Image: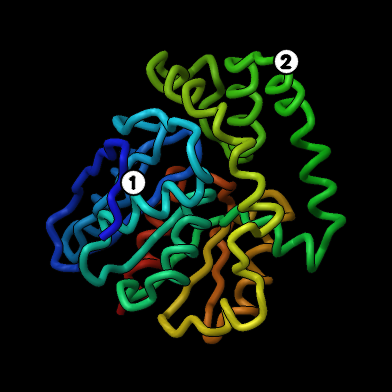
Amino acid sequence: MRDLSQPIHVRLMGEGARDVLAIHCTIAHSGAWKRLASLVSDEATFHAFDMLSHGQSADWDGQGDFQDRNVEAALMVLDRPMDVVGHSFGATVALRVAVERPDLVRSLTLIEPVFFAVALQDTPELVAEHDRIARPYLEAMQAGDWPLAARLFNRMWSTDDGPRWPQLPEATRAAMIRGIPVVPACDAALFDDRAGMLTSGVLQGLNMPVMLLRGGQTQAVIGSINDGLVRRIPGAIGHVVEGAGHMVPISHPQDVALHLKAFWR
């Protein structure tokens, strides 16, 4: 077990016998899994941790790689075999966990993983389109306007009918503003594949059951990433939740719960 120098908060949800490690998306927190966990609580217990600079965990101290540090946090929680579920950036952490410790991952569910390096290999034009859409929030980041950057980042990824920024509780907005500065620190992992997961034989060597989920109304680049991972991981299956956007586990938890239950069985 690796020693993690900064405190990590873990939330338990559900009462079922199936242990699930759940890893949330950027600028959210472990509570984002609450509704989904309640829908599978009869068979699963979610062990959901707050990533550094999110929820009740400590702020990232800037040391090391941000994805690496959260992989270490995940492995602190993963002290026995579990089903692993990740959303967005959390899904990229989940994939790293499966690559590093396949013996502890009973099954792997990746929901809208933002692993842009896959699309850079397969459909670079869709990454260019994502970059165009991202330009306003990136400009706000460069200007150091964290509230505007968080607002624009949230809107960019909330492509479904979720609440607009003024409708969000003040505490939720503050949490998003707190987390937004870590986003650029994810680029080396997401765009450059710093961890080498696309090296020949790495993903092809995964042997646990793997499911990819995405919303039908999400950004086109996510479809490319999901399809690319399904092609690269032996036996992986992909599903689309129609009418949902990037925040599908929050906006459409009933659909995701049905997919999880069928997959686990």
The residue depicted at 54 percent of the width and 59 percent of the height is: 241
Where is residue 207 drawn, in percent x and y? 45, 85
Q: Which residue is mark 1?
A: 33
Q: Is residue 14 shown to the viewer in this render?
A: yes
Tell me the kind of residue under disc 1. Trp
Where is residue 36 drawn, in percent x and y? 32, 51
- The dot on residue 16 is none
Q: Is residue 61 left or right of residue 236?
A: left
Residue 169 falls in which quadrant of the image?
top left
Count neighbours of disc 2 (C-alpha within 10 A) and say few if under 14, some if 14 to 19, many if 20 or more. few
Mark 2 or mark 1: which comes first in sequence? 1
Q: Is 41 or 185 nearer to us in this picture?
A: 185
Q: Is residue 74 left or right of residue 47?
A: right
Element class at badge 2:
loop
Gap in Å between the C-alphas at discs 2 and 1? 32 Å
The residue depicted at 39 percent of the width and 51 percent of the height is: 23
- The dot on residue 143 is 2
Display coloring? rainbow
Above or below, 238 against 45 in this view is below
Tell me the kind of residue under disc 2. Ala
